[in-house]
Image (cartoon, rainbow, N blue to C red):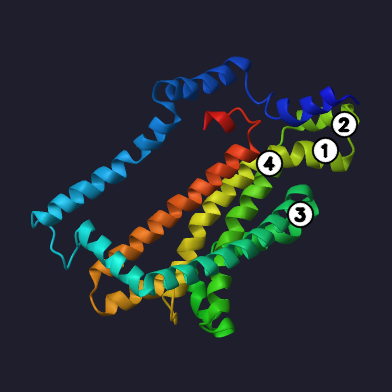
């Protein structure tokens, strides 16, 4: 088989038969036209307009006395509090502890969810054995499972990492299965006609075709990881951003509470930015990713 034929299978053919050519052209031209008017940097700046406007209005309302400091402190006060906690080392220590917990749970959950998703995606027998149990566990809320997890694992680091891993597993699992099952059968047939082996079909057609869905699962899992960590750090934690918020609640420090919320939001934006970067790099061949984003 020639290199030209393999290149056509790897990059061009995936997703080529999913829509008529006119629809693909329209969907490709729309973001390109918008991007041409504003540019990539202009679009990035535009995405920050609403958050910055909200902060400005918030500061104005607080300075005008419409917002009581005990209810919602001004952004300037929150910034001063952040600087004070950072200089004492408290904020950086708690932030580092939370990041380590989230990273450990994310890696474990991704490995479990991805492994199970690949098994179920490729095997109907594995689906019959695994999927129903996974869906039943997924339906259990964090707060309902928390007492049993504490009985099993206590309130130490293991409990917190376990809850994060549990939350991450399900979006990775669901999107991995969905991505594998949504690969166009025509592409598989084309690969067989070209003489690709089963391993080559998986590596060159199935996994690249499933990658957009898998990366969507990663983005969802990043948000779920922080949600699970907040729940975990409210019970028996001695450090971490969640502990900082709970400790501030005891002393009615609304400025610290708002600071922790802002930190969660900024971490979420940074994590989503990393996921988008991975999409642009790994899906450069896809018409809806790469240069269009």
Name the residue located 56 percent from the left edge and 64 percent from the top edge. Answer: 103
Residue of label 4: 210
Which image quadrant is residue 172 in?
bottom right
Residue of label 3: 119
Q: Look at the picture and state if 118 lies above or below 252.
A: above
Q: Is mark 3 on a helix, strand or loop?
A: helix
Observer-nearest of 130 and 41: 41
Q: Is residue 132 among the parts visible in the rendering?
A: no
Q: Report the Cα–Cα distance between label 3 and label 1.
A: 16 Å
Which image quadrant is residue 37 in?
top left
Q: Report the Cα–Cα distance between label 4 and label 3.
A: 14 Å
For discs 4 and 3, the disc positioned in front in the rendered view: 4
Q: Is mark 4 on a helix, strand or loop?
A: helix
Q: Position of residue 220 (x, y in %)?
A: 53, 51
Q: Report the Cα–Cα distance between label 4 and label 1.
A: 12 Å
**Mark closer to the chain start, 3 or 1:** 3
Q: Report the Cα–Cα distance between label 2 and label 4.
A: 18 Å
Left or right placement of residue 290 versus residue 3 in this view: left
Left or right placement of residue 8 versus residue 17 in this view: right
Q: Report the Cα–Cα distance between label 2 and label 3.
A: 22 Å
**Mark closer to the chain start, 2 or 3:** 3
Q: Is mark 1 on a helix, strand or loop?
A: helix
């Amino acid at each position: 088989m020639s290199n030209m034929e393999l290149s056509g299978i790897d990059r061009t053919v995936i997703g080529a038969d999913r829509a008529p050519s006119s629809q693909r052209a329209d969907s490709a031209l729309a973001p390109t036209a918008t991007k041409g008017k504003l540019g990539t940097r202009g679009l990035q700046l535009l995405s920050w307009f609403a958050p910055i406007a909200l902060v400005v209005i918030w500061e104005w309302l607080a300075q005008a006395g419409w917002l009581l400091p005990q209810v919602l402190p001004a952004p300037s006060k929150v910034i001063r509090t952040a600087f004070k906690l950072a200089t004492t080392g408290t904020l950086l220590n708690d932030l580092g502890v939370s990041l380590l917990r989230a990273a450990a749970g994310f890696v474990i959950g991704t490995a479990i969810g991805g492994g199970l998703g690949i098994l179920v995606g490729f095997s109907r027998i594995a689906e019959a054995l695994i999927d129903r149990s996974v869906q039943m566990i997924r339906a259990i809320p964090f707060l309902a499972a928390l007492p049993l997890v504490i009985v099993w694992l206590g309130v130490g680091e293991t409990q917190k990492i376990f809850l994060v891993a549990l939350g991450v597993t399900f979006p990775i699992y669901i999107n991995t299965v969905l991505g594998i099952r949504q690969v166009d059968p025509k592409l598989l047939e084309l690969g067989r006609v070209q003489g690709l082996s089963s391993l080559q079909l998986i590596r060159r057609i199935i996994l690249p075709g499933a990658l957009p869905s898998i990366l969507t699962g990663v983005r969802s899992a990043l948000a779920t990881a922080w949600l699970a960590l907040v729940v975990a750090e409210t019970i028996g934690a001695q450090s971490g951003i969640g502990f900082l918020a709970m400790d501030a609640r005891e002393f009615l420090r609304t400025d610290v509470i708002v600071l922790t919320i802002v930190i969660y939001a900024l971490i979420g934006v940074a994590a989503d930015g990393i996921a988008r970067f991975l999409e642009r790099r790994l899906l450069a061949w896809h018409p809806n990713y790469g240069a269009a984003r």
